[in-house]
Amino acid sequence: MDSGISKTDLGEMNAAELSQLFKSGKASPVDAAKASLNRIERFNPAVNAFAFVTPELAITAAKESEERWRKKEALSPIDGAPTTIKEMTPVKGIPWRRGSVLGGKEPSSQEFLIMQRLRAAGVTVLGTTTSPEFAWKGVTHGPIVGNTTNPWRTDRASGGSSGGAAVAAALNMGVFHEGSDGAGSIRIPASFCGCFGFKPSCGWIPYDTPSNLLELTHRGPLTRTAEDTALFLKATTGATPLVRFGSPPAVSPDWPEAIEHATVKGLKVGYSRNLGYAKVQEDVAAALDRTALRLAEMGALVEEVDPGFSDPQDALLALWYPAEALIVDTLKPTADQQALMDPALLEICEKGRKYSAIDFIKAEQVRGDLKVRMALFHERFDILMLPTMPIVAFEAGLDFPGNVKGKDWSDWSPFTYPFNMTGQPAVSVPCGFDRDGMPIGVQFVGARNADELVLQIGAAYQAAYPEPFVSEPISR
């Protein structure tokens, strides 16, 4: 189909814009797939965002979508939308690598519920995006993965563990990018790369398979806009008897309708600069203060306040380390395979084997106390606003800024993991840049199951104060 629109123009469009073109016949899903594949070919060598790119599978799916649109039988508004999947999620026809030498070598024959729902919506899968080994850390590099770098400065980290997804979103190498978030893995790279990253309440995008991280892990989208996030959620949220973790509502919101006239007017927003215990980079603090003033000007009732809990990092590690150890031990790596694994992952696995059931129960008690503390906070405030990250993206290829090793990588992401422990919805929205031109994200957190409200404030803020996107990787 001759769209009359250049591939470059299609490649800059979001899912909502493409849907209108598909509906009108001015462009086809094949055009859009080719535009996305072209951007991947141009940009990915500089950033390493993809584990596998599957042009033949993508074009086949796009042609099927094109025919559905021609017959006016589109499966959904996002039928044919170019989409990527984090390599932690299996996709039929693509090896389920999971960032590891222990991952699958042959094309997968299985898919989970989230993929089944995306297939039912008709999306075009372009390939899988990079993750650190078994998604164990908040940056994306490793012996098998290589180094996924930041499009704003390719000598800086992308964040992780959904680093490839965030880079693909920032560069619009596709319009939907599936990610997962166990301690910040959607929001960290969203903040570092300047895109929109949404972590729903636990279970709203249901996990229908076992997860060693239990209710810490949430699936969600990384996109350029709140509008695209809403379309992704419309396709993937909803109750099922197969859900293992969390409690999705019987009926999901109409996400696109919920943000159509999003406003912050009258919302009670509690603004915390540092949760009372963390250090924040000066430029980040200034950007968040500016965001708070903007929200107040938009009609929100903003009050400076800390929720009143201490850092729950030790409890997080008591849940996280044994989970990673179990993943690795189940796969029984040989000595030769261990030599090709991330040494730091093997180190935390060794620590994880030393935790006891009593340690686990104590950590769960901390998690329970934190859930209550935040529930009481949300009796006073609709939204907690705070930095997504206390820093901007640091040097690529390192687990710690400046390579100064601390207790755990989560040392430098203190504002994300508390809300995995509580299961609350949270979104990272671009809100400015530091003096070196690196993106900064503001995080909005809502009460558990108040996902609609969280998306609305993110949408309203982005609409009022949109930040620019990077047009191509900037090499340093």
Image (tube, rainbow, N blue to C red):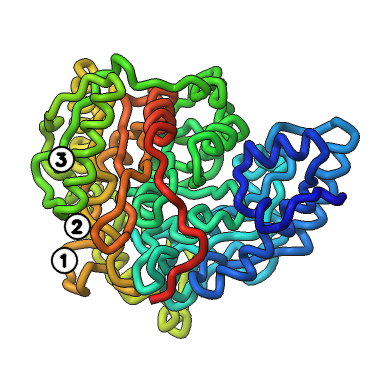
**Precedes in sequence: disc 3 or disc 1:** 3
Q: Position of residue 403 (x, y in %)?
A: 21, 74
CA gap between label 1 and label 2 equals: 7 Å
Q: Is residue 437 visible?
A: yes
Residue 356 lies left or right of residue 99; in this view the side is: left
Label 3 sits on residue = 273
Q: Position of residue 224 (x, y in %)?
A: 50, 46
- Where, by quadrant of the figure, is residue 17 drawn? top right
**Precedes in sequence: disc 1 or disc 2:** 1
Query: Are the two marked residues, 1 and 2, in contact with CB atoms closer than 8 angstroms?
Result: yes
Label 2 sits on residue = 411
Q: Residue at x 60, y 41 (%)?
A: 114
CA gap between label 3 and label 1 equals: 22 Å
* Amino acid type, label 3: Arg
- 164 and 271: which is toward the camera: 271
Q: Which tag is nearer the camera, tag 3 or tag 1?
A: 3
Secondary structure type for disc 1: loop
* Amino acid type, label 2: Asp
* Amino acid type, label 1: Gly
Vertical position of residue 196 compared to residue 109: above or below: above
Residue 177 lies left or right of residue 61; in this view the side is: left
User: Which residue is at the far right?
Assistant: 71
Secondary structure type for disc 2: helix
Q: Position of residue 217 (x, y in %)?
A: 41, 44
Label 1 sits on residue = 406
